[in-house]
């Protein structure tokens, strides 16, 4: 077996998950937040060396490279900047957990494709719960922990809504699939496969497209907007202050989840008050309501 074919088989067989990463961007010339899809490793001596792509949130730059990872470490070397090594946490997994998760997720997804889309109601329920808890947020240490949790949950709810809405809509509409697979700017349909990969796979192109969409980090709202714009012909981003607040909250969410609430730039703890959380909740409600209405209108025309 050739080296290239063996590498392709290893990439195809690997379990991949998106991960946030902080690194020095050679283009922005500063520490930035970004995302990368990493192969999952298991506690059985697994190690892997595979090609990856690192996305920079700050300047929208993209870097090809190689990740070398095992259970204890994970390092990424960029092709065009080999002197810059990105160190991050390995994406650890347990085989039984992923098997159960995949089964439950695909079972849920198949059920939703046959029923009306419930993701809008799920988002509203989450934001309603967030609003009910905002009144408990003060400036003491314990309530600040709650504030960080509520901000992170709000952004997670947005991410889940965008992901499930796009995936379910695309799964049910061949025209949307054709647009996404045919887009040269996205490049989803240009990925090369062996003919043997399609054997036994029903609707191969659709299956691969949905796998790609499930791996997208939808808290990268610019990338999410590109997918919605190409696939469904709609813009999901708010404008002006609402867009600024949404992007600010996404960055704060990264600090809350990965830095225990510490601002990467100032080194100080984020102070999150009731007013910010309420403005964010209202902004996300408006964003999600608008997207849901646009998707409903699009679906009637497809």
Image: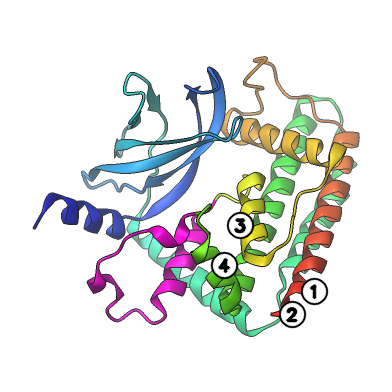
Vertical side of 84 occupied by 132: above or below = below
Tell me which residue sits at (75%, 69%) in the image: 295
Q: Is residue 281 left or right of residue 30?
A: right
Q: Quadrant of residue 211?
A: bottom left
Q: Are marks 3 and 2 in contact (CB under 8 Å)?
A: no
Query: Tag on residue 301?
Result: 2
Q: Are marks 2 and 1 in contact (CB under 8 Å)?
A: yes
Closest to the observer: 99 or 163? Answer: 163
Mark toward the viewer: 4 or 3: 4
Q: Is residue 215 magenta?
A: yes
Disc 2 versus disc 4: distance between alpha carbons? 15 Å
Spot occupied by residue 154 in the image (x, y as percentages of width and height): 74, 48
Disc 2 versus disc 1: distance between alpha carbons? 7 Å
Q: Secondary structure at mark 3?
A: helix
Q: Which residue is mark 4?
A: 179
Q: Which residue is mark 1?
A: 297
Give the magenta part as a residue range: 187-216
Q: Quadrant of residue 227?
A: bottom right
Q: Which residue is mark 3?
A: 227
Mark 3 nearby-residue class (10 Å; few <14, some 14–19, many ≥20): many
Q: Secondary structure at mark 1?
A: helix
Chain-order first, disc 4 or disc 3: 4
Spot occupied by residue 20 in the image (x, y as percentages of width and height): 52, 38
């Amino acid at each position: 077996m050739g080296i290239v074919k063996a590498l392709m088989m290893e990439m195809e067989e690997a379990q991949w998950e998106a991960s946030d990463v902080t690194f020095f961007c050679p283009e922005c010339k500063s520490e930035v937040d970004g995302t990368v899809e990493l192969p999952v490793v298991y506690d059985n001596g697994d190690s892997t060396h595979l090609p990856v792509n690192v996305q920079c949130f700050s300047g929208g730059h993209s870097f090809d490279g190689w990740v070398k990872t095992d259970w204890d470490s994970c390092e990424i070397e960029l092709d065009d900047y080999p002197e810059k090594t990105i160190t991050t946490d390995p994406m650890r997994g347990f085989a039984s957990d992923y098997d159960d998760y995949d089964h439950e997720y695909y079972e849920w997804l198949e059920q939703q494709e046959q029923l009306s889309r419930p993701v809008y109601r799920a988002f509203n329920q989450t934001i309603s719960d967030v609003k009910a808890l905002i009144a408990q947020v003060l400036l003491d240490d314990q309530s600040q922990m709650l504030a960080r949790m509520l901000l992170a949950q709000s952004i997670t709810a947005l991410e889940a809504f965008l992901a499930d809405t796009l995936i379910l809509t695309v799964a049910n509409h061949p025209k949307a699939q054709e647009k996404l697979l045919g887009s040269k700017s996205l490049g989803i349909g240009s990925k090369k496969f062996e003919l043997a990969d399609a054997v036994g796979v029903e609707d191969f192109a659709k299956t691969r497209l949905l796998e790609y969409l499930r791996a997208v980090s939808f808290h990268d709202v610019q990338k999410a907007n590109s997918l919605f714009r190409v696939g469904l012909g709609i813009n999901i981003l708010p404008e002006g202050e609402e867009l600024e607040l949404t992007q600010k909250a996404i960055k704060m969410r990264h600090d809350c989840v990965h830095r225990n609430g510490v601002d990467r730039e100032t080194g100080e703890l984020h102070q999150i008050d009731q007013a910010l959380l309420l403005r964010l909740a209202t902004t996300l409600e408006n964003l999600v309501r608008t997207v849901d209405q646009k998707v409903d209108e699009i679906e009637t025309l497809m």
